[in-house]
Amino acid sequence: MKTDSSSAAKITKKSKTKKIDRVESSLKESSCDLSLFKFKSGTVVALVLFVVFGLLNSLFEGKAVAKLPFKPFGLVMKMSHRGLQGEDATDCSMVFLYLLCSISIRTNLQKFLGFSPSRGTSSGLFPIPDPKTN
């Protein structure tokens, strides 16, 4: 609207300016609504994951929930063996397994709760390609 230049009277320029102002204020309002919606969705997802973590942590505290097919290195071993008794490095604690699962489940949980991002925005490391552009 701003770049559209036509040889019209001042009255048309004033009405065009008013239209531009209305569109800009509508855009600002929509942007504010969108950021509020994103904040709410992020809060709900974080709260659900926090409650599930607390529940699972109390149920599986000190128990090995999985056996890793390899011996992890350094920092990964500290995370995977956190809270477990014994020296077997291939034992996996609930915290490590929860971390891996929450990374993969987060987007599905957002979709299930209705907070998924629109198709036009790229989400995650590997966004789904849009078939309309091909």
Image (tube, helix red, strand yellow):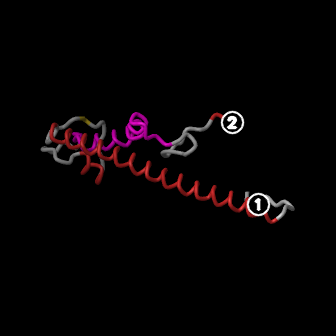
Of tags 1 and 2, the one toward the viewer is 1
Any magenta on residue 9? no
Q: Quadrant of residue 102?
A: top left
In the orientation shown, which residue stands out farthest toward the bottom? 10
Q: Residues within 10 Å of mark 1 (few under 14, many from 20)?
A: few
Under circle 2, the secondary element is: loop
Under circle 1, the secondary element is: loop
Place of residue 54 in the rendered image (x, y in percent of width and height, measured from the top left): 20, 43
**Residue contact between numbered discs 1 and 2, judged by CB atoms under 8 Å:** no
Write the residue at 55% across / 40% down: 119
Horizontal side, residue 111 vs residue 71: left or right: right
Q: Quadrant of residue 26?
A: bottom right
Q: Is residue 61 above or below residue 39?
A: above
Q: Amino acid at mark 2?
A: Asn
Segment tinted magenta in the rendering: 90-117
Sequence-earlier tag: 1 or 2: 1
Place of residue 70 in the rendered image (x, y in percent of width and height, measured from the top left): 30, 40
Which residue is labeled 1 in the image? 3
Which residue is labeled 2 in the image? 134
* Label ID, residue 23: none
Write the residue at 17% across / 38% down: 60
Horizontal side, residue 107 vs residue 99: left or right: right
Horizontal side, residue 41 vs residue 29: left or right: left
- Point out the image quarter for the C terminus: top right
Q: Is residue 46 above or below residue 8?
A: above
